[in-house]
């Protein structure tokens, strides 16, 4: 599952993203986010999908295994989330310890779905390099797989997962109000 992420610098993008972003080191559900739509345009949306059958539920992640079969995801379109990295929590005894996942040299793109300006991240089972932190991870896309993603021919594989740098970060990220650079700093 991907419950928080960071977007603070789009300069390392392989795309020409000509849009101002306010740095956010703790993007949380219901936040305004940047996504790439199926016309390859960058636009703002909100992170959480509201199913038609409930006004109270907000879905932030969709399992790749049920994306094409659950009624909840009918009539959605594909989109791509733009991020510098994401947080995941590892359960150690009774505590949950936050870890930051990033590729420091480039932007990360997560497969997503969108409906009526509300989006959620598509997840899959984690690869071995990531599963010691959490059993789920975002579907991470490369620029050359965008067309397959939008045409629904993508197989949910993440070729570059082994390039992700993972390290422990401060518990300050546990509070969505804490939006500062220190959230992504490595703890030793």
Image: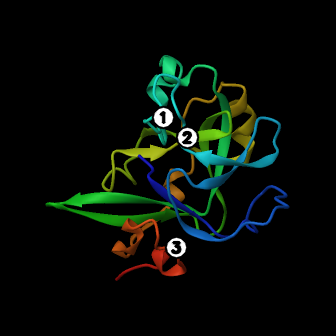
| Residue occupied by mark 1 | 62
Q: Earlier in the sequence, mark 3 or mark 1?
A: 1
Query: Tags 2 and 3 in contact by the CB under 8 Å rule?
Result: no
Q: Secondary structure at mark 2?
A: strand
- Along the polypeptide, which appears first: circle 2 or circle 1? 1
State the colouring used for the structure image: rainbow
Determine whether label 2 and label 1 are within 8 Å by CB: yes
Q: Where does the image place residue 37, in percent across and percent down from the top left? A: 75, 40
Asked if residue 51 can be seen in this view, the reply is yes
Q: Residue at x 73, y 47 (%)?
A: 143
Left or right of 29: which side holds 14?
A: right
Q: Quadrant of residue 7?
A: bottom right
Q: Quadrant of the C terminus?
A: bottom left
Q: CA distance from mark 2 to mark 1?
A: 7 Å
Q: Position of residue 47 (x, y in %)?
A: 57, 47
Q: Quadrant of residue 141?
A: top right
**Residue to which mark 2 is pinned:** 120
Residue bearing the label numbered 3:
179
The secondary structure type at the circle numbered 3 is loop
Q: Nearer the viewer, mark 3 or mark 1?
A: 3
């Amino acid at each position: 599952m991907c419950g928080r992420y960071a977007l603070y610098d789009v300069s390392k993008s392989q795309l020409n993203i000509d849009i101002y972003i306010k740095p956010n080191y703790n993007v949380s559900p219901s936040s305004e986010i940047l996504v790439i739509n199926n016309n390859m345009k960058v636009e703002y949306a909100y992170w959480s999908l509201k199913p038609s059958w409930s006004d109270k539920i907000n879905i932030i992640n969709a399992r790749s295994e049920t994306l094409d079969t659950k009624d909840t995801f009918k009539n959605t379109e594909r989109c791509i989330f733009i991020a510098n990295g994401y947080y995941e929590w590892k359960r150690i005894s009774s505590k949950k310890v936050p870890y930051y996942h990033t590729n420091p040299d480039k932007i990360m793109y997560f497969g997503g779905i969108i409906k009526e300006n509300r989006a959620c991240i598509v997840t899959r089972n984690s690869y071995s390099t990531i599963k010691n932190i959490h059993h789920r991870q975002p579907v991470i896309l490369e620029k050359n797989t965008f067309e397959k993603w939008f045409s629904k021919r993508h197989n949910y594989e993440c070729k570059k997962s082994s390039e992700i740098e993972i390290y422990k970060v401060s518990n300050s990220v546990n509070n969505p109000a804490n939006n500062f650079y220190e959230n992504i700093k490595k703890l030793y």
